[in-house]
Image (cartoon, coloured by chain):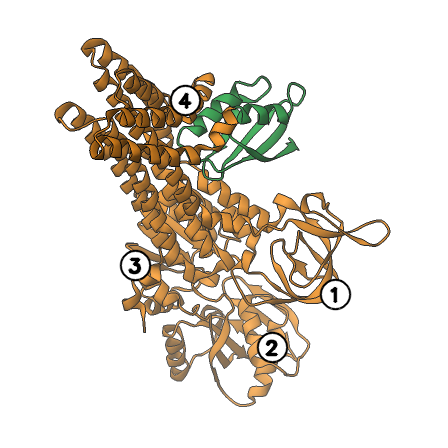
């Protein structure tokens, strides 16, 4: 299990939190309960199984929604 | 392609605006229907493109977002050839989003300023002894780093060599530079004003004091209270319900116009955004003024505060007692003071330290048969004289006769708020000292301000005798003061207040008061050890500065009020729109979209007011001396 903190471009729309939450939760290997989308700091924090997917896969899923990923940090749990 | 359209959203907005102007000019000025229709139609198609893309992306992850509602509404309007409406709605939606982004960035700016103070690079010693610039993430514990004048300290550590002075304002809020030499501790995010030093890294990244402050503020700005979680849950189902309602209205009335108007009016924007905006602006203001409020739950509790309980020593007083008054009895005072100092030298009681400091240079003698009398003091024998040092109880035990004069002195000292230290030699009272802890400068004004902000009870708890406590309490104008309290008595007292249904804050030094800090709704630690204060407090006062307390409370109240206003605005607007669509003639899609976007901007601008909140300005006249 790894913990990822992903910094996004500034989130401004009310529904984007929900979109990003749903998109990341549906990925196989992401711990559903751990997903936290922080509106004001424009960050996503989640735990994932690094044998099933990489942080790049998560970034890709977010980018597909139209949100730019600025930086991500992965730490072993 | 999708990305390209989204990136050009702002361009599309402006082109849309120009086309709408052309459209109206064609219609009203030149009476040219063809130009008008084409201009509006092109504006609609261009404008709806980015919205439709967002809607598609949302639907892909099973979210019925506002974009979905707006896209359907615009397509519907296009379908019934109402190009003017569709053009205006798309423009307002895009323009609203543009303004929201700008204003939101502004409300978040205070916290952004803080996080941008984080150090980014470091000069790290490589194996061959040279220093090389690296990213701060690449520094490990134990690395040796070089810091030059004007640079930020990259990590928490100790000085290995060199000297300098450091501005620690980012950690302590104190802007006076602090001198550092070998073995001094240095903190990440502080700035080396002058000098060059080499340091060894002790704590890195998020483990540094600065890293923890940032993390705390970042978590605080996004923490949600029960009410907000409810709004979020509500919002999740709200948009799908509006969509369903639109479909039902269309199915029964066959009135596309009415159905799409409902879709536009149902957008929940201001409701979702209002509370987080107040929260981030309030916490941002605090961060600028050396006050960290840990989240909106804390803000809510703090703003409804009934009672504030203070620990005395180290909180209301400086915590550094000194001898304020003394009287000597009999002859050979020098000898008596020497005995007193000799006894006190063996004790680490705070009163003993104050006494020793007062006596200064003296002749020390051999102390034998030392007895510590609990709740009394110390008795010992020096040069075959029986010496007792302690309070009145001890003197009675020792059978010391107190003269009328001495009794009067003792009374006077107690009323002045002193703790008493009496010294007897062979059953004769020789020295009476009154030790007093100084009240922190400015505390009286600060307490008055707290009262003015609506705190009903200001209570002081202390381990000192009731006489001392009463004297301090009178001076400070407190509601209640209780002496002779052990730490467990203090927490029991807090518990009692909570059981009475009061909302209680406890302000203590964070060391031996942790049960009380944890028990109170709001714990505020004043310990000068930043770590303890940050971990245990719900409200952190940088540098343990008592004078920030009124600002913290005033800000919490203003923020809570701001949140309530925003909820009221949001709910009011939705109700107003829904009512007018069924009850009035003039409501249509464009007006609905305008009111909706305007309400979002109003809540953001309302939140932004908090950035400028300043207690001193609000009560300026009363406080000025």
Q: Residues within 10 Å of mark 3 (few under 14, many from 20)?
A: some
Q: Can marks 2 and 3 be said to lie on one chain? A: yes
Q: Secondary structure at mark 2?
A: helix
The mark nearer the N terminus, 4 or 1, is: 4
Q: CA distance from mark 2 to mark 4?
A: 85 Å
Q: For mark 3, what is the residue?
A: B451
Q: Residue at x 38, y 52 (%)?
A: B611
Q: Can marks 1 and 3 be said to lie on one chain? A: yes
Q: For mark 1, what is the residue?
A: B162
Q: Secondary structure at mark 3?
A: helix
Q: Residues within 10 Å of mark 2 (few under 14, many from 20)?
A: many
The mark nearer the N terminus, 1 or 3, is: 1
The mark nearer the N terminus, 2 or 3, is: 2
Q: In the figure, is residue A10 to the left or right of B129?
A: left
Question: Mark 1 or 3, which is nearer the eye?
Answer: 1
Question: Mark 2 or 3, which is nearer the eye?
Answer: 3
Q: Is residue B408 visible?
A: yes
Q: Chain of mark 2?
A: B
Q: Quadrant of the C terminus of chain B?
A: bottom left
The mark nearer the N terminus, 4 or 3, is: 4
Q: Position of residue B31 (x, y in %)?
A: 21, 30
Q: For mark 4, what is the residue?
A: B52
Q: Chain of mark 1?
A: B
* Contact check, label 4 and label 1, Cβ < 8 Å: no
Chain letter, orange:
B
Task: Name the one closer to the observer, B208 or B96.
Answer: B96
* Contact check, label 4 and label 3, Cβ < 8 Å: no
Q: Quadrant of residue B338?
A: bottom right
The mark nearer the N terminus, 2 or 4, is: 4
Residue B341 is marked as: 2
Chain letter, green:
A
The mark nearer the N terminus, 1 or 2, is: 1
């Amino acid at each position: 299990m790894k913990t990822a903190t992903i910094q996004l471009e500034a989130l401004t729309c009310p529904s984007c939190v929900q979109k990003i939450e749903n998109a990341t939760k549906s990925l196989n290997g992401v711990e559903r309960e751990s997903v936290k989308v922080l509106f004001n700091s424009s960050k996503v924090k989640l735990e994932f199984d690094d044998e099933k997917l990489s942080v790049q896969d998560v970034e890709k899923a977010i980018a597909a929604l139209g949100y730019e990923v600025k930086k991500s940090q992965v730490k072993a749990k | 392609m999708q990305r390209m359209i989204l990136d050009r959203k702002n361009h599309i907005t402006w082109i849309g605006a120009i086309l709408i102007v052309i459209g109206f000019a064609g219609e009203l000025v030149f009476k040219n229907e063809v130009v008008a229709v084409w201009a509006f139609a092109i504006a609609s198609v261009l404008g709806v493109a980015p919205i439709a893309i967002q809607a598609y992306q949302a639907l892909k992850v099973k979210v019925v977002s506002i974009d979905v509602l707006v896209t359907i509404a615009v397509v519907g309007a296009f379908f019934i050839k109402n190009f003017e409406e569709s053009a205006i709605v798309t423009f307002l939606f895009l323009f609203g989003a543009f303004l929201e982004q700008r204003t939101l960035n502004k409300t978040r700016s205070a916290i952004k300023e803080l996080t941008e103070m984080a150090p980014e690079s470091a000069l790290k010693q490589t194996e061959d002894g040279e220093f090389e610039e690296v990213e701060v993430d690449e520094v490990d514990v134990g690395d040796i780093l070089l810091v030059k004048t004007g640079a930020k300290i990259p990590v928490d550590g100790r000085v290995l060599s060199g000297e300098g002075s450091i501005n620690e304002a980012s950690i302590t809020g104190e802007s006076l530079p602090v001198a550092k030499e070998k073995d001094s501790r240095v903190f990440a995010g502080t700035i080396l004003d002058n000098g060059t030093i080499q340091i060894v890294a002790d704590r890195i990244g998020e483990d540094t004091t600065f890293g923890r402050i940032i993390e705390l503020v970042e978590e605080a700005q996004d923490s949600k209270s029960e009410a907000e979680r409810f709004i979020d849950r509500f919002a999740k189902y709200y948009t799908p319900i509006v969509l369903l309602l639109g479909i039902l209205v269309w199915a029964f009335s066959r009135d596309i116009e009415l159905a799409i108007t409902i879709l536009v009016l149902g957008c929940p924007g201001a409701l979702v955004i209002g509370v987080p905006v107040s929260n981030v602006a309030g916490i941002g203001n605090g961060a600028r003024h050396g006050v960290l409020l840990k989240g909106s739950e804390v803000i809510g509790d703090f703003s409804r505060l009934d009672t504030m309980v203070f620990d005395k020593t180290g909180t209301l007083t400086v915590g550094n007692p000194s001898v304020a008054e003394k009287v000597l009895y009999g002859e050979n005072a020098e000898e008596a003071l020497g005995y007193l100092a000799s006894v006190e030298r063996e004790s680490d009681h705070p009163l003993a330290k104050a006494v020793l400091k007062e006596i200064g240079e003296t002749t020390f003698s051999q102390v034998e048969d030392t007895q510590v009398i609990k709740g009394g003091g110390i008795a010992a024998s020096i040069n075959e004289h029986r010496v007792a040092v302690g309070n009145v109880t001890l003197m009675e035990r020792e059978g010391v006769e107190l003269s009328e004069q001495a009794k009067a002195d003792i009374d006077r000292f107690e009323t002045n708020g002193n703790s008493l230290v009496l010294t007897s030699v062979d059953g004769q009272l020789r020295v009476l000292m009154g030790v007093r802890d100084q009240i922190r400068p400015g505390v009286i004004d600060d307490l008055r301000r707290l009262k003015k902000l609506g705190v009903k009870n200001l209570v002081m708890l202390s381990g000192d005798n009731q006489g001392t406590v009463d004297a301090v309490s009178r001076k400070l104008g407190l509601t209640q003061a209780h002496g002779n309290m052990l730490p467990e008595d203090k927490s029991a007292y807090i518990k009692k207040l909570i059981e009475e249904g009061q909302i209680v804050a406890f302000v203590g030094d964070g060391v031996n008061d942790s049960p009380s800090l944890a028990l109170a709704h709001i714990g505020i630690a004043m310990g000068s050890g930043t770590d303890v204060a940050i971990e245990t407090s719900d409200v952190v006062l940088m540098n343990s500065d008592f004078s920030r307390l009124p600002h913290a409370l005033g800000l919490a109240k203003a923020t809570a009020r701001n949140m309530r206003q925003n909820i009221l605005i949001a709910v009011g607007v939705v109700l107003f729109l829904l009512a007018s669509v069924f009850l009035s003639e003039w409501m249509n899609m464009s007006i609905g979209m305008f009111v909706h976007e305007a309400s979002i901007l109003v809540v953001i601008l309302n939140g932004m007011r908090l950035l400028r909140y300043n207690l001193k300005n609000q009560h300026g006249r009363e406080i000025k001396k």
